[in-house]
Image: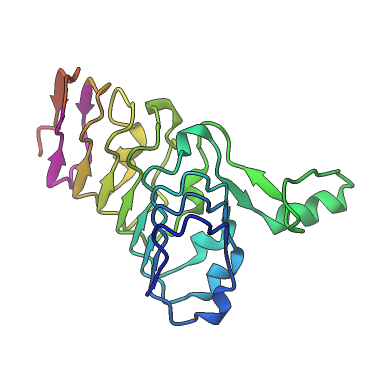
Amino acid sequence: ILNLNFCKQLHSLGEFDRLPALERLIVRNCIGLVEVCESIEQCAELVFIDLSYCKKLERLPRNIGMLKNVKTMLLDGCSLGESRIQIRDTDSLELCKANKIDINTRTSSPAFVGAIPSDLKLFSVYLPRSLVSLSLANNNLSTESFPMDFSSLIMLRHLYLDGNPIDSMPSCVRSLRRLEILSLSNCEMLTSVEHPPHTLKELIIHFDSMHLLRKVVFDPEM
């Protein structure tokens, strides 16, 4: 277990090759954290990653999606809706060199930093496919900014989207064929939840203040 909660001066997190047995990485409320380095791929035993409220987080390694044992990932309050997070992509660097394309990066790293599109359509590609629980709460994500397809997350059972300004259940949720828990609490712009996955066992919708919810529709076979 590596717990670095509230380390406000922490800027970069790396040298994971020194921690091959690491199972739980907890870096919550590290408000100065900017990047997580690609050496995280060396932590083959990782099952839990908490990067919640690392509001300045800008860079995640592309190979974080290669981790095969991560079951829970918490990205609450990471400003995903502001399109700040980028992906280190060494393959893209080599491609650009081969085609003599000039690249300007904001870091001293030799790796090309490719920004996730503003609508985050490709974001799910970079998440571990082994995920069982994913929290994207309080990220200022609108309905339109969610990925078109979450089907790569074939093991996902728990999804927490609380506190985002979505007006309806994102369509990508329907591609989660094993989803059992969907939480949409305090999504104050939410007006409808229609046709969630048939596997759903628990739908959590709670509001602390006024809300716009008018319609919840389940398929008849549910």
Image coordinates for residue 4, horizontal then vertical, percent: 42, 65
Q: How many marks?
A: 0
Q: Nearer the viewer, residue 134 or 95?
A: 134
Q: Nearer the viewer, residue 47 or 125?
A: 47
Residue at image coords 10%, 32%: 220
Residue at image coords 73%, 57%: 111
- Way the structure is coloured: rainbow
Image coordinates for residue 51, horizontal then vertical, percent: 42, 55
Q: Quadrant of residue 13?
A: bottom right
Residue at image coords 18%, 42%: 198
Q: Main secondary structure of the magenta part?
A: loop
Q: In the image, is residue 37 above or below residue 115?
A: below
* Quadrant where the C terminus is found in the figure: top left
* Quadrant where the N terminus is found in the figure: bottom left
Image coordinates for residue 58, horizontal then vertical, percent: 57, 47
Q: In the image, is residue 80 above or below residue 53?
A: above
Q: Which residues are magenta?
A: 192-208
In the displayed structure image, the side of residue 217 where residue 158 appears, left or right: right
Residue at image coords 36%, 44%: 136
Asked if the magenta segment contains residue 173, the reply would be no
Q: Nearer the viewer, residue 40 or 107?
A: 107
| Residue farthest along the right direction in this orientation | 100
Image coordinates for residue 29, horizontal then vertical, percent: 40, 52
Asked if the magenta segment contains residue 203, the reply would be yes
